[in-house]
């Protein structure tokens, strides 16, 4: 389809230079840009969520000392 667009001079110069640098037409660059914008808007945004807060009154398992790195490493290496 043939159309006429009014584009900011600086934006046009940058787009034309990029198309030339990539060895492609300005038309294909504009088509790609429009497709990217439309595809981005078509994708549903992620729903916000919050992580649940634990109400547990527990703690660590017996024998686990969080202040002793060597013992923690030993526990993690156990099979």
Image: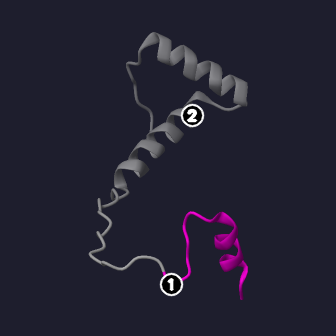
User: Which type of secondary structure does the marked residue at label 1 adopt?
Assistant: loop
Q: Residue at x 54, y 67 (%)?
A: 66
Who comes first in sequence, dot 1 or dot 2? Answer: 2
Residue 4 image offset from top left, x and y in percent: 40, 24
Q: Is residue 4 above or below residue 59?
A: above
User: Label 2: how many residues lie within 10 Å, few (<14), some (14-19) or many (20+)?
Assistant: some
Q: Indicate whether residue 63 is drawn in magenta.
A: yes
Q: Is residue 1 above or below residue 72?
A: above
Q: Residue at x 56, y 18 (%)?
A: 14
Q: In this view, does 11 lie to the left or right of 41?
A: right
Tell me, for residue 29, which label it has, or none.
Answer: 2
The quarter of the displayed image where residue 58 is located: bottom left
Q: Quick one: which residue is furthest to the top in this view?
A: 9
Colour treatment of the image:
one colour
- Which of discs 1 and 2 lies nearer the camera? The answer is 1
Q: Is residue 44 left or right of residue 66?
A: left
Q: Which residue is drawn at 33% across and 59% down?
A: 44
Q: Which of 58 and 20 is in front in this view?
A: 58
Q: Mark 1 points at which residue?
A: 62
Q: In this view, does 29 lie above or below 17?
A: below
Q: Nearer the viewer, residue 47 or 33?
A: 47
User: Which type of secondary structure does the marked residue at label 2 adopt?
Assistant: helix
Q: Is residue 38 left or right of residue 26?
A: left
Q: Nearer the viewer, residue 72 or 49?
A: 72
Residue 49 image offset from top left, x and y in percent: 29, 63
Residue stretch in magenta: 61-79
């Amino acid at each position: 389809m043939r159309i006429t667009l009014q584009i900011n001079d600086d934006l046009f110069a940058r787009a034309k230079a990029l198309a030339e640098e990539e060895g492609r037409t300005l038309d294909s660059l504009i088509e790609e840009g429009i497709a990217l914008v439309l595809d981005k808007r078509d994708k549903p945004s992620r729903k916000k969520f919050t992580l649940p807060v634990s109400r547990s009154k527990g703690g660590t398992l017996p024998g686990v000392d969080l202040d002793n790195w060597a013992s923690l490493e030993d526990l993690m290496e156990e099979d």
